[in-house]
Image (cartoon, grey):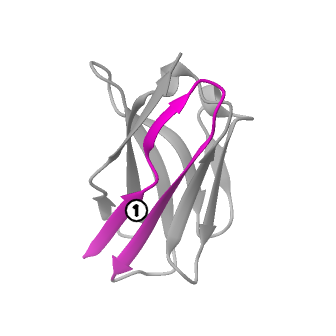
């Protein structure tokens, strides 16, 4: 089992910044992905950014150049630095952990990000 605890959401004006954190605890194997997804009201959950334990990252086109995902493997923590936020970034942001070989995945409880115009 893996437990994910997110923090850092809130209300910010357009153009502002927020930093999300997600700490994983439990049975953590070295080969894994940690990622951030988001879900806006009435929309499907979508991938925002993913970080692999190998060091690779990928981003949704809508956030490239504005968001940065990083991780501290020693702390089993992943971060999402969000800059130049837009109202369309408003959503509940979820942390996701997935073991690469087994495919087992776990979700955090979600943290609300609201960007006012």
Count of all numbered marks drawn on residues in the image = 1
Q: Residues within 10 Å of mark 1 (few under 14, many from 20)?
A: many
Q: Is 24 one of the magenta-colored residues?
A: yes
Q: Position of residue 34 (x, y in %)?
A: 49, 60
Q: Is residue 71 left or right of residue 109?
A: right
SS at mark 1 in the image: strand
| Observer-nearest of 7 and 46 | 7
Considering the whole magenta stretch, tell me its main secondary structure: strand
Point out the stretch of residues depicted in magenta.
Answer: 1-26
Q: Is residue 3 above or below residue 103?
A: below
Query: What residue occupies the far right of the structure in this picture?
Result: 65
Q: Is residue 17 left or right of residue 8?
A: right
Where does label 1 land, which residue?
Answer: 97
Q: Quadrant of the N terminus?
A: bottom left
Residue 18 falls in which quadrant of the image?
Answer: top right
Q: Is 18 one of the magenta-colored residues?
A: yes
Residue 107 falls in which quadrant of the image?
Answer: bottom left
Q: Position of residue 3 (x, y in %)?
A: 29, 71
| Observer-nearest of 24 and 30 | 24
Q: Is residue 41 above or below residue 3?
A: above
């Amino acid at each position: 089992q893996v437990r994910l605890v997110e923090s850092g959401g809130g209300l910010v004006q357009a153009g502002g910044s927020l930093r999300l954190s997600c700490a994983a605890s439990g049975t953590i194997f070295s080969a894994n992905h940690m990622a951030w997804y988001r879900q806006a009201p009435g929309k499907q959950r979508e991938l925002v950014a993913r970080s692999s334990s190998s060091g690779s990252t990928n981003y949704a086109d809508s956030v490239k150049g504005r968001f940065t995902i990083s991780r501290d493997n020693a702390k089993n923590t992943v971060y999402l630095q969000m800059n130049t936020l837009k109202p369309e970034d408003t959503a509940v942001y979820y942390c996701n952990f997935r073991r690469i070989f087994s495919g087992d995945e776990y979700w955090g409880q979600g943290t609300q990000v609201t960007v006012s115009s």
